[in-house]
Amino acid sequence: MTILSRSDADHIATLTLSAPARLNALSDEMIAALQSALDDIAASPEIRVVIIAGGEKAFCAGHDLREMQAKRDAPDGGQAAIKDLFDRCTALMLRIQSLPQPVIAQVRGVAVAAGCQLVATCDLAVASDDARFGVNGVNIGLFCSTPMVALTRNIPRKAAFEMLTTGRLINAEEAQALGLINKSVPPDSLADQARALAATIASKLQSAVRTGKSTFYAQAPMSTQDAYALAGAAMVRNMANPDTDEGITAFLDKRPPDWRD
């Protein structure tokens, strides 16, 4: 049985983490499977939105601790192997944000440590109201330094530092209030709500969405002046698109657009 399944329908690719015995941990195998699937999706123009889902008990419980401990048997105490693991996990997180298509996390159960990092890295997140989130590595003596990078780009600094230093888990209501997720919904409507959000995005002009996503992340670390320059250039390119001309004309004519994209 594969640890990552993929289903495509209506321009939406759903990737489901399927390693329940390990609580969908980001093992070497899971990281490789996700990386491969996302690379394939990036080259698939028919896919417009991606949903990453987990199981009922766990969305993702972070890295596989047994696998990490086993790496200590190397002559260097596992430092090279552990560095390689975190490098590959970082590459996966960066791949999600460099992906042309928007990525939605569909979260049920726990999303902790690198699993919380995965939620924070996705462009959007919908969670069941019984989901829980945390960067609780500090409880076992391993500060969640890499998950911290994504977390602190989602929620206020003091809230993030409290989570990181106390190991406290937060519920979906608090996660939504802090900005870690977009919405929390009843468990039985989670998949439908995530898919409805994906369908809405998939209905838009995809060249505009893809330009918008890349510009969104590129401008974020810039000064305000440089961000406006980058965004202005993106809008000029967007306006030059014949499909954008059709979209604006259709709006003014009060009719649906006839896009080629």
Image (cartoon, rainbow, N blue to C red):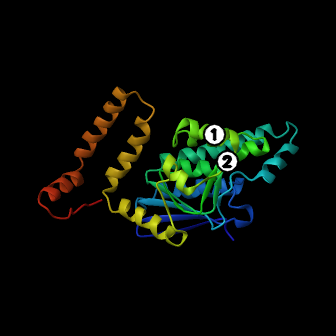
Quote the CA–CA distance across marks 1 and 2: 8 Å
Q: Residue at x 70, y 61 (%)?
A: 23
Q: Indicate the quadrant containing the N terminus: top left, top right, bottom left or bottom right.
A: bottom right
What label does residue 162 carry, if any? Answer: 1
Quadrant assignment for the C terminus: bottom left
Where is mark 2, residue-wise? 168
Q: Position of residue 39 (x, y in %)?
A: 53, 54
**Residue at 36% from the left image edge and 62% from the top image edge:** 200
> For the point 14% across and 55% down, which residue is it?
249
Measured along the vertical axis of the image, is residue 177 above or below residue 194?
above
Q: Residues within 10 Å of mark 2 (few under 14, many from 20)?
A: some
Where residue 174 appears, x then y in whole percent?
54, 51
Q: Is residue 249 above or below residue 255?
A: above
Return the disc, 1 or 2, that comes first in the chain's sequence.
1
| Residue kind at label 1, given as amino acid type | Glu
Q: Do labels 1 and 2 touch, CB within 8 Å? A: yes
241 or 108, nearer to the observer: 108
- Which residue is at the front of the view, 81 or 255? 255
- Residue 63 rendering spot, x and y as whole percentages: 71, 51
Crowding around mark 1 (Cα neighbors within 10 Å: few <14, some 14 to 19, many 20+) is few
SS label for mark 1: helix
Q: Position of residue 229 (x, y in %)?
A: 31, 30
Q: Amino acid at mark 2?
A: Arg
The picture quadrant where one finds residue 201 is bottom left
Judged from this view, the residue extending furthest toward the left is: 253
Q: Count how many numbered circles sit on residues in the image.
A: 2
